[in-house]
Amino acid sequence: MITAFIIGCEIGFWVFVLAGLLFRYIFKLKLLGTLFLLATPLIDLALVIATVYDLRGGAEATFAHSLAAVYIGVSIAFGHRMIKWADERFAHRFAGGPAPAGKPKYGTEHARYERNGWLHHLLAWAIGSIILYGMIWMVGDPARTEALFHTLRLWSLVLGIDFLISFSYTLWPRKKKAVS
């Protein structure tokens, strides 16, 4: 049940983003579009409430419960960036806005971009970890929350690998290939 709710929240997030952009650029109702975009955190709130309710009701924590924490961390840390990305493309396509700038591919700009992406990942991990530890604390039964601890360990490993890759561009910047 909680897995379906998480999937529904992810779909709901993008429906709200799309509705916000449609109202903003297609229907020229900027205020309504902005309200839809600003309402996206309500989906995260509903997800937290449903997950905690499920766990407090006696459910054994599963990967789906931990996925809710990951989703919320990523949504908060990267949400503004994702909405800005979509907004730039919508503005260009439907409102005559400037073409979106691509991400830097070489040199120090690329290294800075990758480090910034890792810092967003660190923020997502911190938020998700706080939520996971909160769930573990609220359940109060280590046997029922082992899946949450497993997700914390796995996500920490992924964060470490991302750090090595992202910061490697600082030491060894990507260079343009020579044209012959």
Image (spheres, grey):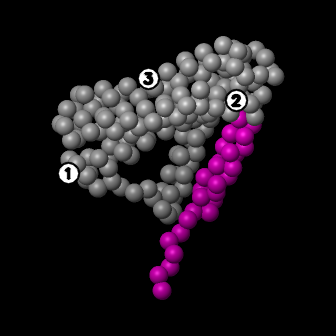
Between 75 and 174, the one lying in front of the other is: 75
Q: Quadrant of residue 143?
A: top right
Label 3–label 1 contact, CB within 8 A: no
| Amino acid at the residue labelled 3 | Leu
In primary-sequence order, the first of circles 3 and 1 is: 3
Query: According to the image, label 2 marks what residue?
Result: 62
Question: Does the segment drawn in magenta span residue 125?
Answer: no
Q: Percent x, y for residue 35?
A: 30, 26
User: Which residues lie in the magenta part?
Assistant: 151-180
Between 127 and 36, the one lying in front of the other is: 36
Residue at point 33%, 53% (across, down): 100
Residues packed near mark 2 inside 10 Å, few (<14), some (14 to 19) or many (20 plus): some
Task: Say if 176 sits above or below 17 in the image.
Answer: below
| Amino acid at the residue labelled 2 | Thr
Distance from label 2 to label 3 (Cα)? 23 Å
Task: Say if 67 sits above or below 162 in the image.
Answer: above
Query: According to the image, label 1 marks what residue?
Result: 96
Q: Nearer the viewer, mark 3 or mark 1?
A: 3
